Amino acid sequence: MDDILNYVADFGFQIWEWFGIEENRNRSTAIATVFGALAILIGTVWMLIKLCFNTATNRNKIGTSTIPENAISLTPEQFAANNAALLIAAETNLKTAHDAEKTQLQQKIEELRKRAAHPEQALADAKATIAKLEDTLTREGNDIGEARMAEAREALEAGDFSIADDIFAEIEACELLAVERTARAAFARGEIAEQEIRWTDAAEHYARAAELHPTYDKLYSALESSLRNGEYVNAIAFGKKLLEIAQTKFGLTHQKYARALNIHAASLTAAGKNNLAEPFYKQAIEITKQTLGENHPDYARGLNNLAGLYQATGKYDLAEPLYLQATEITKQTLGENHPAYATHLNNLALLYHTTGKYDLAEPLSKQAIEIDKHTIGENHPDYATHLNNLALLYNTTGKYDLAEPLYLQAIEIDKQTLGENHPDYAIRLNNLAELYCAIGKYDLAELLYTQAIEIGKQTLGVNHPAYATRLNNLAGLYAATGKCDLAELLCNQAISIFETSLGPDHPSTITVKTNYQDFLKIRP
């Protein structure tokens, strides 16, 4: 213990030397010096910790005024005069106000009269509001000059809100510029993701840009990207906002409004809301006809989309001439080596396939694929779609050895670009399952059907025709493998969905009903 005290005393002597103290160099005083220095150090640290804690606590008390209301200089006489001036102005404006403004002015007059009837409570409320506003002004007005801030505080405390309102308007404008800048950055990231064929990322970036700063171009890209990404609910929501902005900014006869109508209708079609989509398509086509004429790619796009709707609803005789017209316009305006031309060829081929004109369908489908190779490349979802459709044709005509590698290639492309939770990926799985079912690989087929059904349930919902198609296909597999109870259950479920979504006279509904009746006849 004595050694420790000697060490402490030596340290005390050292402290004296640092400060040039030569007197009172005794052991007890030196020890006392050390302990005194420690006490001062501990006290200083404690004060700093407490100060930091109190500062942080005050910063976190957002919305809680730190300015006592009795410090506010607003007098009852000033408050009553301000209230009376506002009341006179409101009553004067009411005499010349339009109907839409009268309700708001009457509410304002009623509130001002209520304040005049209860001046003490109204003044207390006003002081509490002023105190909160002054706190907010202090927190948020860091970039405002101190002289102007002092002027605003003084005016606020006297019941004059005008200077504070101007300052808050400036702060709001600055924040809006920051939001717009963030939106532009998000939009640019969406464009980068598109170039790198990262469709899911592109959809997320465009959606963020549109939500932060919903302009026409941002909403259009967000809708288009959501549609491609299989997010049909989001696409429809963006479409509604897009139509509002297009109508307000450009008017009902502008081509940009027509484009908004067309792509919104495409979202409705993809979601299985065909009855809602048709009038939008027709309106878009008419506007485009009046603004751009009938020899323009936008007009061809509108015709193609309406034809797709007619094909989906079984009106094949109406679909074919529109597809043919769209294909010819695109050929004349964009040329035969353009992705849009390949898309129109593919769609016409799919119609011919559906109507049994296989000899017409195959060369068109092959031509579309060849154009894709030289334009969008072999790692693009549209290329996967065209591969899938040619495979579908081969599957229908019994060329299973040609169909399987095309299906597998399409599945891999979609997996890499769209992901495994996309409606198009489910389509590929379903179609490959049909092939396996046709060649007797029932275990593989059942696994793929089940996976496709689950994806459809999550992305399209249980009332979509595509979901019903997969239920019906799995029912066919169960019927072929003797699982008759399961087959009957799924058949009835599919028929119900088809009748509700497509109607009782749609070819798909009729086909499923006929197959079900044939199944009942042979069921053990």
Image: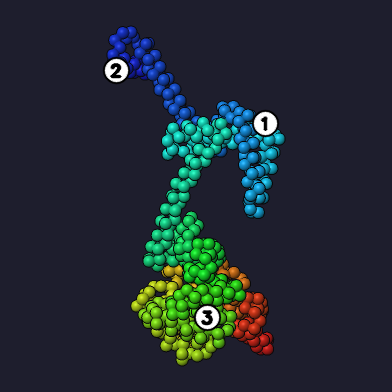
Q: Which amino acid, mark 1?
A: Glu
Look at mark 1 in the image and give the residue it sits on. Answer: 120
* CA separation in Å, label 3 and label 2: 95 Å
Vertical position of residue 208 compared to residue 405: above or below: above
Label 2 is placed on what type of residue?
Answer: Trp
Task: Check disc 2 and report the residue beneath it.
Answer: 18
Q: Nearer the viewer, mark 1 or mark 3?
A: 1
Location of mark 3 (residue): 307
Question: 10 Å neighbourhood of mark 2: few (<14), some, or many (≥20)?
Answer: few
Residue 64 shown left or right of residue 229 in the figure:
right
Hey, which residue is sitting farthest top in the picture?
A: 24
Q: Quadrant of residue 15?
A: top left
Identify which residue is drawn at 51% across, 74% down: 287
The residue located at (49%, 79%) in the rendering is: 304
Q: Residue at x 44, y 66 (%)?
A: 199
Please state which amino acid type lies under the numbered disc 3. Ala
